[in-house]
Image (spheres, rainbow, N blue to C red):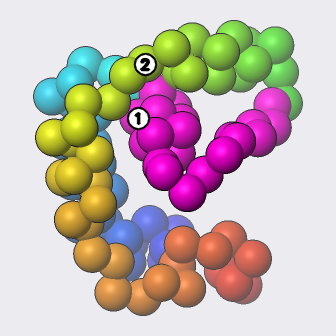
């Protein structure tokens, strides 16, 4: 996948943070979104009961502020890669 290839460095950084925290990527992603000052609510979609359960578990995870700062410092050069509607 070209998007994954272009974001490889950033994905490695996120995976390293995930490993240090001992959490899942879902926990990391949802906790990061929930802890944004300018985000009031986070809406998730699910395809299965197991995915719903994983999301419910993920919202319980608390992201330490040091790691939030580490994520904030990840610099994606091509911001279009962050919007899946532009991947075609």
Q: Which residues are magenta?
A: 25-46
Residue at x 84% of width, y 30% of height: 47
Q: Give yes or no for contact between labels 2 and 1 (Cβ–Cβ under 8 Å).
A: yes
Disc number placed over residue 61 in the picture, else none: 2
Residue 70 as seen in the image, left or right of residue 35:
left
Residue 1's label in the rendered image is none
Estimate the x, y position of residue 59 in percent, counting from the top left: 56, 21
User: Which tag, 2 or 1, sits closer to the chain's start?
Assistant: 1
| Label 1 neighbour load within 10 Å: few <14, some 14-19, many 20+ | many
- At a point 48% along the width and 49% down the height, the residue shown is 36
For residue 28, the mark is 1
Quadrant of res 56:
top right
Percent x, y for residue 65?
23, 38
On the rendered structure, is 23 left or right of 42? Answer: left
Q: Quadrant of residue 46?
A: top right
- Tell whether position 41 is magenta: yes
């Amino acid at each position: 996948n070209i998007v994954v290839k272009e974001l490889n460095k950033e994905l490695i950084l996120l995976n390293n943070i995930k490993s240090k925290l001992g959490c899942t990527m879902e926990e990391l992603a949802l906790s990061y979104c929930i802890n944004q000052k300018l985000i009031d609510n986070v809406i998730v979609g699910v395809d299965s009961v197991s995915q719903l359960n994983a999301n419910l578990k993920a919202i319980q995870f608390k992201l330490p502020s040091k790691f939030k700062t580490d994520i904030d410092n990840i610099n994606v050069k091509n911001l279009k890669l962050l919007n899946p509607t532009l991947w075609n």
